[in-house]
Structure formats: structure tokens, C-alpha cells
Image (tube, rainbow, N blue to C red):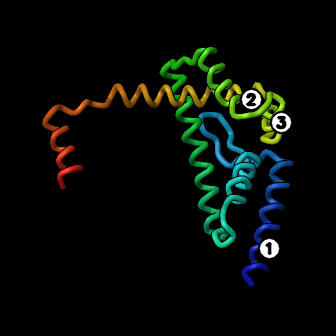
Amino acid sequence: MKKIVFLLFALFLLQNVVVAQETNDVVATVDGQNITKKYVNKILKEDFDKLPENQKTDENLKLLVNKIVNQKIEDILLIDAAKQAKVEVTKEAIDTAMNNIKAGFKTEKDFEEDLKNEGLTKKEFETELKESLMKIKYVSTEINSKAQKPNDEELKNIYSKIYLF
């Protein structure tokens, strides 16, 4: 019975993925940017396929959809906040990050093939990389500007709680 339910569910999911690839129905709009069913279903398929068979349930599907949409909303808001804060990422930083990623591939052709499999052009990937670096820089700047270093007494208390129980 579980196999039948799963097969029906998989068929339903596959149908939604195919339909979503043909349309750009909007799931949510954040600061003028649309989050489409096509985007959600692309990520959903990748994440859902990674789940063990016994975890491929309707409930987990709903949780994944919510996680994907919420993550995209957070990304959009962080990028907007970084832009408003005038966070700059240099071309050198992008090139360094790109070279570090490419180093994980045997050849440039393997890297380009992986981009193609992900449905990305080199330019789109570079834009995503730049936005990721902007988010990292923005968050680390915000945290560092608001974080207070502990004084000696606080350090002693923390040390005694961790090591001296």
C-alpha cells in the first residue's frame, strides 16, 4: 500500500514539476521579485530526491516547500539589505571565489557541464556568487558591529561552566 501511495505521490510531484517548468506561476513576491513555482519545484525535486524512501511523505513535502520559499524570501531580503547598506564585492573577490569553486573540478569543461546541468549560464552563476558574497559580507559586518567582546570576568564564567562543571 505504501508503494502505491508513494508512486501516486511521485507521479503527482512529477506532474507538478513538468507543469511548473512550462509556466512561471508566482508563489510569492518579495520587494518586487517573484518566486515562481518553476524555481520552487526545481529545488524541491533536488531536495525530495535526497530523502530516504520512508521520509517521502506529504507532510515532508509541505515542509520542504515552506523551507524553500522561506529561504528564498530570506535571500531576497538579505540581498536587498546588503544593497541598501551599499555592500560592495570586488571583481577580485568574485574571481577568487570562482577559482576556488572551479578547483573542485578536473577541467573547465567539467565545471561548465555542471553549470549546464544546473540550468545556469556562467554569467548567472557569477551573479549568484556575487550575491552570496554580498550576503556573507553584510551579515558578518552587521554581527561584528553589534557584537560585544566578553570581558575577563565573563570569559572566566564561560570557561568554568564549560570545563569545570
Image spot of residue 46 (x, y percent):
72, 53
Amino acid, disc 2:
Glu
Image spot of residue 128 (x, y percent):
67, 31
164 w.r.t. 124: above or below: below
Q: For the residue labelled by badge 2, is the local secondary structure a helix, a strand or a loop?
A: helix
Task: Bin the neighbour count of mark 1 within 10 Å (Cα to Cα): few under 14, some 14-19, many 20 and up.
Answer: few
Q: Which residue is mark 3?
A: 113
Q: Which residue is mark 2?
A: 124
Q: Residue furthest front?
A: 106
Q: Nearer the viewer, mark 3 or mark 2?
A: 3
Q: Residue placed at 68% from the left, 49% from the top?
A: 27
38 w.r.t. 133: above or below: below
Amino acid, disc 3:
Glu
State the mark number for residue 8. 1
Q: Quadrant of residue 33?
A: top right
State the CA–CA distance, disc 3 to disc 2: 14 Å
Task: Bin the neighbour count of mark 2 within 10 Å (Cα to Cα): few under 14, some 14-19, many 20 and up.
Answer: few
**Direction from residue 104 to residue 14 in the image, left or right:** right
Q: Residue placed at 13% from the left, 36% from the top?
A: 153
State the CA–CA distance, disc 2 to disc 1: 35 Å
Image spot of residue 18 (x, y percent):
85, 55
Q: Quadrant of residue 103?
A: top right
Q: For the residue labelled by badge 3, is the local secondary structure a helix, a strand or a loop?
A: helix
Amino acid, disc 1:
Leu
User: Mark 3 or 1 closer to N-term?
Assistant: 1
